[in-house]
Every structure is written in structure tokens, then in C-alpha cells.
Amino acid sequence: MAGAARQAARRAKPSPRDPSQVQSLTRAIGLLNTLADVPEGMPLGDLAQVVGLAPSTAHRLLTTLQNQRFVRFVAGEGVWQVGVQAFVVGQPFRRARDLLSLARPAMRRLMEESGETANLYIEEGGEAVCMGQVECRQVMRAIARPGGRVKMHCSGSGKAMLAALPDAEVTRILQVHGLPKLTPKTLDTPRKLRDDLAEARRRGFALDDEEHAVGLRCVAAAVLDEEGRPLAALSLSGPVARLGDAALLAAGARVAKAAEAVTVELGGRPSP
């Protein structure tokens, strides 16, 4: 067995059986993980041996994966390889990872210039998900852990991304997630939110004026792709005590400029 295949075999050793797992799905993922370690592909017999399955069972699972384009069979070589759909499914994670790496210098500059915490959010499942943060040096500061989720309608980053989406998509997100009122200032009707999004487009950045948490303000601007759709949003957040009206608008201008620079660096199309 070749070196890559031996490495795959070590990784493919079965873990203790968890009664909550679906056995066929676990086995299919094992096949995918093994093929991922051997780009040139593997014959059915070797692949079945590595994952510890009967060849007939492995073939049945591979055929199912092939129907969904997660694997492919190269008839001329008699080997199975990872298929294009595995690449498609992995692209959002790769894009998010690359985006964070590219945006982090801009986030650090934003923090240094403003003295407030800089954040990067993406939209996932109709919510804003924190991908990274550069915390400020103040004792009082806003903290959002990577992976944390916030509602789109009451967060600066969420509203910045909503403002860059077509009305039909905004409507769909609101239908699924609603407009729960988290603070007395949360915009809790579609009309209020749409007026606010129109103002964000005119201004060039979105505001969260204690709409997500009492005492916290935030400004955010969207990072756009080549079609002008939101890939993410950069934001600055801090307490009302430091982000008065003048400081808030100044922070918004900084965020808008930084988001446009990241958009250009990614090959996106800046908003008019």
C-alpha cells in the first residue's frame, strides 16, 4: 500500500460506536475522508480494506455518493476519487477562512484608529455569525466569541448585510426569523427595518443603536463580492459612554472605508 494510503488507513481506524450516530452516514464519511488523503484515488478493494468494510458495502455507499457527485469512479484507472460536490460544499468554509485572513489587518487598523473592538461577521442561515474579532484595550469592551450568532435585524453587521441584499431575500429572512424585540430600541416592524436599511444604503454603513443590547452601539459596512452581494460585514462596537453621536458617525466612516478596501482586495464590486 502506498504512503498516502497507509496514512489514510491510520486515520480511518473506527472510533468507539456512538449510539446516536447513523452507521451508514458514518461509513460514507469515512470513505470520503480516506479518499481525501489519496488524491490519485484508490481501487475498491484497497478502499474497503482501509475503512474496514466489505467490498459490497463500500461499493453500495460509493455508488450513493457518486449519484450526488461527492465521489467519482475513473473507469480507465479503476479507482475512486473525491468528486466535485465535495469541493463545492467545502468552498464556503474556505472562503470564510480566506476572508478572515485577508480582513484581519483591516480589523486591527480599525481597532487602533477608533479604540473600539473590530469584528467580522458572515451571514449563515439568515443570522449573522461572528468569524473573528480584534478586541480593544479598554476595560469596558464588547466581546463576541467566534461562532456566536446574532439576529440580522438588530445587529449592525446583520443590517449592513441585509442592506446589500435584494428585497426578496430580506423578506425571506424576516419570514423565517421574525423581528424579536430584544431591547426597547429594537426595530420590530418590517416598515421600520426597511426604512433603516434604506438609510444605511444612503449613509454607507449600518447602525445598531442599543438594538441588540442596552448600552452597546455598533457601526458596520458590508464586504461585497464581484456581483455586489454581501460576503461579510466589518463592524466596530463599544459602549454608549464612548460612542456618542459624533464618535459613532466617525467610526462608521472608518468602517465603510475599510469594508470598501477589503471588497476591492477580494476583487469585489464596491457599492455606489
Image (spheres, rainbow, N blue to C red):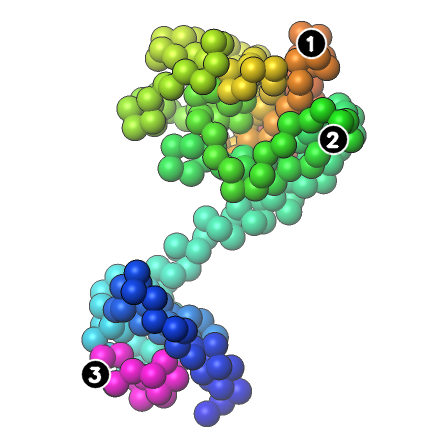
Q: Report the magenta residues as a range.
A: 42-58
The residue to which callout 3 is attached is 56
The residue positioned 42% from the left and 70% from the top of the image is: 33
Q: CA distance from mark 1 to mark 3?
A: 68 Å
Is the C terminus in the top left, top right, bottom left or bottom right quadrant?
top right
For mark 1, give the secondary structure. loop
Residue 86 visible within the image: yes
The amino acid marked with disc number 3 is Ser
Q: Observer-nearest residue: 2 or 13? A: 13
- Residue at 31% across, 88% down: 45
Q: In the image, residue 225 lies at what x, y percent? A: 50, 37
Element type at marker 2? loop
Q: Which mark is residue 42?
A: none
Image quadrant in which you'd find residue 48: bottom left
Q: State which quadrant residue 104 falls in.
A: top right
Dot placed on the residue nearer the N-terminal end, 2 or 3: 3
Residue 50 highlighted magenta (yes or no): yes
**Chain-order first, disc 1 or disc 3:** 3
| Residues at marks 2 and 3 touching, judged by CB atoms closer than 8 Å | no
Q: Position of residue 195 (x, y in %)?
A: 43, 8
Q: Is residue 223 left or right of residue 67?
A: right
Please tell me how crowded label 3 is: few (under 14), some (14-19), or many (20+) other residues with Cα within 10 Å: few
Residue 96: give x, y in percent of width and height: 53, 46
Going by the numbered disc 2, the residue's amino acid type is Cys
Is residue 144 depicted above or below 99 in this figure? Answer: above
Which residue is disc 1 drawn over? Answer: 244
Q: Which residue is disc 2 drawn over?
A: 136
Local packing at callout 1 (Cα closer than 10 Å; few below 14, some 14-19, many 20+) is few
Given contact means CB atoms under 8 Å apart, are the residues at marks 1 and 3 in contact? no
Cα gap from disc 2 to disc 3, whole angstroms? 58 Å
Q: Residue furthest bottom?
A: 1
The residue nearer to you, when weighing 212 against 58, is 212
